[in-house]
Image (cartoon, coloured by chain):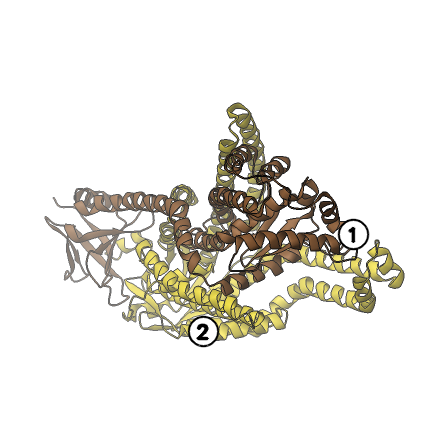
């Protein structure tokens, strides 16, 4: 005997609820209305199970534009129809679709991460030379205004930039002299400007557009003019390679990749920041090595001791700060020192400033 | 046949009033969330389209109104396409804006304000279009809901209202809500049955204004006292001085300064505590007011929502979050200790640096996802469940005569909502 029971049928063109007598016929389920008229005759292969609460089976007619629905709550009938449709290929297909999605999107994530590591720097390196210098300068200025505010230690510590009072300004003139000597050899298309700023850390950085900042803490650790020159030449190297602009472009690309496409699924953007720092530090290592090589060549051409850079690197190593920085962690410093010394051995050594000049220069942040 | 008709959970035929039930099992919901969270981690968030679809499917297909269950017709694929469209639309706009702020340095501040307004407009546009998508994917008794109306008009009116709300320190909020809800519901249809909204802004204002007095009132009072007590000319003078003890100088020149700061701090603290304590009450008030204002033709809705049950939801959420925080702290300490041991054992600094970064990111992701799950399980599911259970519907006789009139709409709005981070169910 064929299973029978009661169900609910919605025809999809009115909201009327039809209580129907259901019959599981040989090839189709048949729904009859109160006057025994056939309201629906759906073959099993077009039955599509749609979400329903526990204790109910709900079917749509596959491929139909009209959202007609058949609902069953009769346990015996539910079991019967479930066994009839279980073997249909369409039901197994649905299970597979989810797994395919998971596999494909995991592969997509993998390729996005790989693209983030290898693709973005390549794209940034290719595009950076095409960015006009005026745009680069404006970018640098925009960043500088923000940075000056965040770096300033406040009124009681004195102005952020050293070298303004009568005691400090002779030092500033010597820094400028040292820089112009390096800049002349480097012959960059943009003007190089160096500022020594009142910060205790041992750090230095270059902004797109040609502005270099040397921290007072780094100057205090320098034991000769060539060490300072080496650091400044390293930063000029970043300018020559347009590393700042490339970093901005990479950061924009990464925040697009991680923030928008992959989705900030835990909120707050912290995972985005973490992923970006991780990838950015991987990029900057190569950039640092290239800037070291540039510094060796520049200081050598200017007539100074190119090995001095490695000496100050060793002295300040251990202080790790974010950004395009001069100091990295210990093992890297060892590698860098080795590379610098290997490249610098070709050049003859002579100090770029006399000991008296160096003594004057060091008073640049001594206070007015 | 009429005898068996009751077996499907429907009310007796011809009944004009009915209530709503939520049939979902919280355990099933938790299972769905946990599986989804795992998939989110594996796919770095791409699975969110599927998880959101699953959550909606669960909520919709467990919501029974007058004996019949809703159905959610949306698919994750539609959300993905909507998202891609939204990104394609937003990228050139972001790019143009970025370039404009860089090259046209003459008006950066104006551009900032303009950008904010534009972003707000886009956000509200997205909210309206996403609502349209969700409605057109909601099926009830074999008929879809749908929404007409202009999303840009809605966005402009919403941004205007929000500006007024900001200027009036929140006092205009009830009328803003009522007006926007009227616009939305006037353009909402179930089949050919037109929706409406009868919630009154003035009534909401009268109900809510005591809460406003308790939270915003002390803040205004404190700030006024502060502004009147502080001598700004003294402050400006001190700014230009380069002394060591700035506070002492202010103290001598303006003796009420310390007291003013104290009042200001106290007022701020009181307002913050009051806002946190009253938030569930406000939520209950808003939900009850909104549900009771909904109309479809002659179908009217009232809500019996109890304020204390909303408090119970938030208490549960806070309690679970606190317990979770203890577990998180213990796990964090354990991981930190393990990483230290590992770095000593491996003695390869580059490797341990990378490993600890991965550990920190992983720890953060898992923690954030667990909090997300607690919130979804307690607050989101709880509010939905309470809201549905509180409903009384009248005039359901109209349901016998509704005809289909709906067309499916695109998921672009949902994509924009996702890309712009303006949430919703």
- Which chain does the brown colour mark? A
Mark pair 2, 1: CA separation: 60 Å
Q: Are marks 2 and 1 on the same chain?
A: no
Q: Position of residue B381 (x, y in %)?
A: 46, 51
Q: Split into 4 quadrants, where in the image is the N terminus of chain A?
A: top left
Q: Which residue is mark 1?
A: A367
In this rendering, position of residue B69 left or right of residue A189: left
Q: Position of residue A258 (x, y in %)?
A: 44, 50
In this rendering, position of residue B83 left or right of residue B102: left
- Which chain does the yellow colour mark? B
Rendered view: A287 above or below B103? above
Q: Which residue is mark 2?
A: B154
Local SS, label 2: helix
Which of the two discs, 2 and 1, sits closer to the camera? Answer: 1
Task: Using the rendered view, name the quadrant where residue A68 is placed.
Answer: bottom left
Task: Using the rendered view, name the quadrant where residue B413 is placed.
Answer: bottom left
Q: Residue at x 51, y 28 (%)?
A: B348
Q: Position of residue A215 (x, y in %)?
A: 66, 48
Closer to us: B237 or B301: B237
């Amino acid at each position: 005997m064929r299973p029978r029971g009661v169900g609910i049928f919605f025809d999809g063109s009115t909201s009327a609820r039809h209580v129907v007598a259901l019959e599981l016929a040989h090839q189709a389920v048949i729904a009859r209305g109160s006057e025994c008229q056939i309201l629906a005759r759906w073959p099993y292969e077009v039955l599509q199970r749609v979400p329903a609460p526990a204790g109910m089976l709900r079917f749509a007619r596959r491929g139909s534009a009209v959202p007609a629905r058949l609902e069953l709550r009769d346990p015996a009938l539910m079991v019967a129809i479930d066994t009839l449709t279980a073997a249909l290929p369409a039901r197994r297909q649905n299970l597979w679709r989810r797994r395919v999605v998971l596999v494909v999107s995991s592969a997509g994530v993998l390729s996005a991460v790989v693209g983030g590591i290898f693709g973005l720097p390549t794209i940034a390196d290719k595009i950076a030379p095409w960015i006009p210098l005026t745009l680069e300068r404006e970018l640098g200025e925009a960043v500088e205004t923000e940075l000056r505010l965040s770096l300033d230690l406040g009124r009681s510590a004195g102005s952020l930039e050293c070298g303004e009072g009568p005691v400090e300004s002779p030092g500033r003139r010597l820094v400028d002299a040292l820089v112009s000597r390096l800049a002349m050899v480097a012959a960059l298309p943009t003007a190089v400007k160096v500022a020594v700023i009142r910060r205790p850390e041992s750090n230095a950085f270059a902004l797109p557009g040609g502005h270099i900042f040397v921290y007072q803490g780094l100057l205090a650790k320098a034991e000769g003019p060539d060490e300072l020159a080496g650091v400044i030449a390293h930063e000029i190297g970043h300018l020559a390679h347009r590393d700042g602009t490339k970093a901005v472009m990479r950061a924009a690309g990464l925040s697009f990749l991680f923030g928008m496409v992959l989705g900030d699924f835990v909120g707050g953007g912290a995972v985005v920041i973490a992923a970006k720092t991780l990838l950015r530090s991987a990029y900057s290592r190569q950039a640092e090595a290239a800037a070291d090589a540039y510094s060796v060549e520049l200081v050598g051409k200017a007539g100074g001791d190119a090995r001095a850079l490695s000496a100050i690197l060793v002295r300040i190593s251990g202080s790790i700060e974010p950004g395009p920085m001069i100091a990295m962690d210990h093992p890297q410093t060892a590698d860098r020192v080795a590379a610098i010394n290997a490249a610098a051995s070709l050049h003859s050594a002579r100090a770029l400033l006399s000991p008296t000049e160096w003594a004057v220069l060091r008073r640049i942040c001594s206070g007015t | 046949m009429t005898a068996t008709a009751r077996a499907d959970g429907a009310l007796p035929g011809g009944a004009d009033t009915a209530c709503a039930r939520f049939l979902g099992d919280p355990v099933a919901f938790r299972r769905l969330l946990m599986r989804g969270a795992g998939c989110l981690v594996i796919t770095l968030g791409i699975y969110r389209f599927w998880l959101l679809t699953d959550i909606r499917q669960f909520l919709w297909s467990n919501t029974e109104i007058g004996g019949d269950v809703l159905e959610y017709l949306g698919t994750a694929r539609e959300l993905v396409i909507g998202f891609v469209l939204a990104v394609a639309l937003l990228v050139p706009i972001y790019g143009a804006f970025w370039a404009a702020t860089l090259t046209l340095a003459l008006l950066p501040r104006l551009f900032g304000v303009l950008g904010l307004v534009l972003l707000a407009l886009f956000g509200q546009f997205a909210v309206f279009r996403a609502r349209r998508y969700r409605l057109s994917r909601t099926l009830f008794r074999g008929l879809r809901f749908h929404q007409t109306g202009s999303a840009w008009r809605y966005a402009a009116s919403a941004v205007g209202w929000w500006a007024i709300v900001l200027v009036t320190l929140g006092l205009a909020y009830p009328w803003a809500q009522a007006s926007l809800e009227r616009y939305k519901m006037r353009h909402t249809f179930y089949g050919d049955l037109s929706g409406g909204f009868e919630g009154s802004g003035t009534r909401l204002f009268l109900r809510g204004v005591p809460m406003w007095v308790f939270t915003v009132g002390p803040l205004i009072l404190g700030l006024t006292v502060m502004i009147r007590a502080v001598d700004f000319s003294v402050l400006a003078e001190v700014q230009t001085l380069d002394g060591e003890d700035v506070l002492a100088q202010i103290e001598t020149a303006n003796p009420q300064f310390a007291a003013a700061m104290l009042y200001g701090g106290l007022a701020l603290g009181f307002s913050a505590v009051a806002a946190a304590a009253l938030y569930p009450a406000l939520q209950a008030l808003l939900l009850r007011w909104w549900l009771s204002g909904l109309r479809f033709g002659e179908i009217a809705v009232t809500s019996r929502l109890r304020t204390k049950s909303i408090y119970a939801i938030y208490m549960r959420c806070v309690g679970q979050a606190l317990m979770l925080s203890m577990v998180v702290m213990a796990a964090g300490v354990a991981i930190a200790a393990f990483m230290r041991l590992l770095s000593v054992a491996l003695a390869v600094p580059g490797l341990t640096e990378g490993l600890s970064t991965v550990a920190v990111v992983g720890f953060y992701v898992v923690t954030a996802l667990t909090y997300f799950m607690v919130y979804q399980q307690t607050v989101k599911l709880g509010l939905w469940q309470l809201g549905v259970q509180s409903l009384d519907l009248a005039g359901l006789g109209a349901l016998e005569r509704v005809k289909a009139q709906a067309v499916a709409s695109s998921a672009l709005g949902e994509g924009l909502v996702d890309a712009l981070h303006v949430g919703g169910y």
